[in-house]
Structure formats: C-alpha cells, structure tokens
Amino acid sequence: MTCSRRTRLGLATLTAGLVTSCSNASGAALNWSGHAVVSPAAYRIPADPAAPSDTALLTQRGSNSRVGWNGHETILNDHNVRVASFGKVVSYPVDGKIYAQPLFLPGLRVDGRLHNVVIVATETDSVYAFDADATGRAPAPLWHTSFLVNGAVPVPDKALACDSVVPGFGITGTPVIDRDTGTLYVIAAMDASGTIVDYLHAIDITTGRDRMRPVLISASVRGTGMGSSHGVVAFSAREEQQHAALLLDHGVVYAAFASYCDRNPFHGWILGYQAGDLHRVVVYNTSPDGVSGGVWQAATGLAATKSGDLVFITGDGTFDLASGGRDASDSVLEMKPGRGTLVVKNYFTPFFQACLADKDQDFGSGAPLLLPKEIIAIGKEGAFDVLSRSSFGGYTTISHPCSRMNDTHVDHIVQETAPQTVRGGVWSAETTWTGPSGQYVYVAGEADQLKAWPLAGGRIAAKPSSQAGQTMVYPGGIPVGSSNGSNPASAIVWILDQEKGPALRAYSASNLADELYSTTQDPSRDAIPSYGNFTLPAIADGRVFAGTSGELLIYGLLH
C-alpha cells in the first residue's frame, strides 16, 4: 500500500492539517480503514447535480435563530417517507464518533467537478467532505483533513476523569460555513504531550486546507472567581470544553464553552474571532467573580438576532446580576457585542435560581427557542418559560424561594408552566412549525414522548395536541423538522431516539401519533448503530444525514 500526504499551511507543530490519500498495489483507492472503495464512476451522480441554493445547511439547525425547521424541503413528504420508498442509501465510514451535526453544500465544485457535498467532523479531529448523491457502496471522500500531527491525539476521557464523551473528544461543536468566502470554521481539541489545547481553524470547503494560520484558544478576564490568580481568571482547555455549535454572525465566529462533568474550577466562556483573520475580538466570562455558569444548551449553538445580539442560556453556578454583579448563571441572556466583550441587554433568571443550582437542575440544559415575539426556554425542571422579546423579565426576589418552586406567578414573564410539564426535563432544543391549523412547538423530554404543543397568543396550551408513541430515555431527543412551507402534507418531524435501541424516526407534524417511518421497520436495510448524546439529524434536498459512532448515514428515496 502507498499513501501520499500533503502538509497544509499552519503552525509548524500542532496545527498543520493533513490530507491523506492511499492506494493499494493495483492503484485502487482505500478508505480510512484500509479497505478498497468504489471509484466515483461506480456510483450514481446526476448529470446536473446542483441542488437548489436554499437547501444549504451552513450552520447547526439551519439558521442563526437555531429554530431547527427546514421550510424549503420540496422532495420529502408524508406519502414517500415510508419504508417501501425511503431508507438508507449509503453509509460512509469515518475515523471516529460524529457528535457534530452534518452540514450540506449544494453545487460545490471540487477538483473541477460539481457535487452536492455533506461535511462532517469527528471526535478524532477529522473533517470529511462526501458526495451527498452517492448510493450503494461508499465512494472515497472528496477530501479528508486530520488535525492530529506530531504525536497529538484526541483528548482521552481519562484525562478529565469524565465519561461524557468516550473514549475521547476532538471536534464536538458543529462547525460553521461562510459560503461567500468558501470557508469552514471548526475548533479541534487535542492532547499534545499531556497538554490539552484547542485550535480554531479556517479551512477551504473545496480542499480542506487551512486558509490561514490556526489560532490557539486562550483568554483571560479580570475577576476573583474560582481558580483566579492575582485578580485574573484564565481560560483553561482542561476545564472548559467547546460543546455548543459555532456561530458566524456579522463577520465574527463565536464559540461557547462549558465543562464536561462540571470539572471545577470552570466558568462559562464566549469567545469571538474575526472571520477574516481569526483575530480575537470578544471575550466574555459568565461567572468572573464566582464559578460555573457553563453554556451547555445540549450542544446547540448560540442564537443571534438580526441586529447581531446573542441569545443563550447558562447553566448552574453563581448569580448576582440583580445586585449589580457580573455572574450570570441559570439565566436567559441577550447580549450585545461591545468594546471587546459582551454587554447584558436583556435577561431572565428564575426566582429560585439558587435552588436550581443547589440541586444541579440547570436552567441551561436546553436551548432557547427564538421566535419573532417570544423566547421559549425549558430546562431540567421541565417547565415552559415564555419570555417577551421586548422585556425578558429580569430577576424577582422573594423570601423562601425553595419552598415556592411550584409557584407559576412570581416571575415577570409571559407564561410559566408547572414543573414537569415536560416529564424528566429537557436536555435538547425545541423546534416549531406553523400550518393551516396554527403554530406548534415540538419538545422531547428526557422521560417523555415527543409532543406537539399549540402556541397561540404567545402562550403554550395546557395540553399537547398530539404525541408520539415512544417514551424517550436519557438524554431525550432533539427534534428537527422539514416541510415545503406550511403545506401539512409535507411537514415532518424527525428525531433520533434510543428507547429500544438507536432509531431514526419520522412523524407527521400535524399528528405525531402518525409515525411515517422508522429505521426499525426494516433493520436489515436501514439500521442505525449507536450514536452520541445530543446528536440530531440534518435534512436537506430529500436527504436525511445522521452521524453515528463510526459512520455518516444518508437516508433518502430509494427509487
């Protein structure tokens, strides 16, 4: 076997990416495990493969609002998403677990040929580009980049005494693509001779090569919080990990951090880098004078408003915003970039925040659902908190808050439902769709069924309008949707669940009791292997992409 390797522009030691291509003695291409793969001529490529431009998935959950509903799906509907006509069409092997959501680029020219491309990243610090139109046996990647050079390895779980991501982690947060410049931004974590480091890369989407010198993630802020030294809190890649998807907004790439297994001393961090040169322009710490406050959100990325403000929820930790402090744990925050950091523009913190923190009941276990007039938040407590976009509600101080946690009339917000409205709480993100009969919010609790909750007049209905038959197990599921606009015959809710083993399921958005399709209906053809926590499918141009523990699976129409 022979292999050729091209070293890319980057730091001389840790950050040079590699493109590796191999062949056997006969010249046949080999895949990552050394097995022969089919040449491009052996699989189907349409004569004009370019999918419509609006089918692109350039960021996690499809947009910076993170709503997670693809309203441009003109191929899939409740008639053809059935086991007789829909199923697994190709399985691409990769070199590790895929936690990040796959991204989709229609009509991308690679090596002079037009392709519809799906890009995935793995926990072994690799990024792959595959032809999304392949069927049957998997062809070789269009390109493959590994950031592991000079003996660097993915960070082993034992290095953190944490089994949150096993056997180790490298790229967890979903990358983001700037289509105008043809650049993909991704953060890779690695262990370099016992030192854990993170690097931000900007790579060419047609080659996988670094476009500019990668940047070592580092930061510090003035503060007296846990782990501070001489009035300074420093970022530590050993304690803080990048789990949430990257955000590209107004020319800045934002990364949010928390800590796997709450390894103290840790803080929540948000760092922003100019997309054009990777110069750091934003440093924000959620608990500079306290501890914790990680940005979890079940790996969902920061949301952004049209004006460039950021919206996100923090997890357990210290809170003193209401008394003029800077610690902002267990809070929904709207932040405005300014003078090298983020400034609080609007916030909401439950009146029993300290009670949540004492019980490890993170408000920020779920992601906010950003709607035109409202924001919906659900955490481990399992209550809907509906906030007005114009005024989030701040913080209300009462006596003996821990004995009044079931009180739904204390906080100054639009609506708060009782705890465990969503059974087991939420470790996921919600999605929403508006059809002829109204608007619905789809939620899958950790010990609940996937349910559709009507939303009218800015308030969640007392009861769901429909629910799926399966009960979720930890950590629940992350629903996403697809439709051709408001057409109910095309509206489908997709979810990965582990109730009786891994499965991809599709439901009618109008009635979740109608399960259109499941990979369990024909497991010999469609079975999905194990996948990581907080994994979500991606839907684009008649395809459904699902990352697993060692493969990228593509589902679509069979004929």
Image: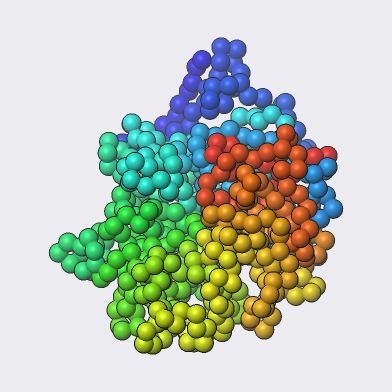
Asked whether residue 316 appears in the rendered view, the answer is: yes
303 w.r.t. 197: above or below: below
Looking at the picture, the colour scheme in use is: rainbow
Q: Quadrant of residue 490?
A: bottom right
Q: Name the residue rendered at 41%, 45% in the picture.
A: 163
Q: Is residue 384 left or right of residue 77?
A: left
- Taking the view exactly as shown, the residue that stands out farthest to the top is 25
Q: Is residue 481 left or right of residue 295?
A: right
Q: Quadrant of the C terminus?
A: top right
Q: Nearer the viewer, residue 390 or 252?
A: 390
239 w.r.t. 97: above or below: below
Asked whether residue 209 appears in the rendered view, the answer is: no
Q: Is residue 397 left or right of residue 99?
A: left
Q: Name the residue rendered at 57%, 56% in the picture.
A: 476
3 w.r.t. 109: above or below: above
Q: Name the residue rendered at 31%, 75% in the picture.
A: 326
Where residue 54 sits in the image (x, y, percent)? Answer: 69, 57
Where residue 315 sits in the image (x, y, percent)? Answer: 41, 66
Where residue 291 sits in the image (x, y, percent)? Answer: 29, 66
Where residue 64 sits in the image (x, y, percent)? Answer: 55, 64
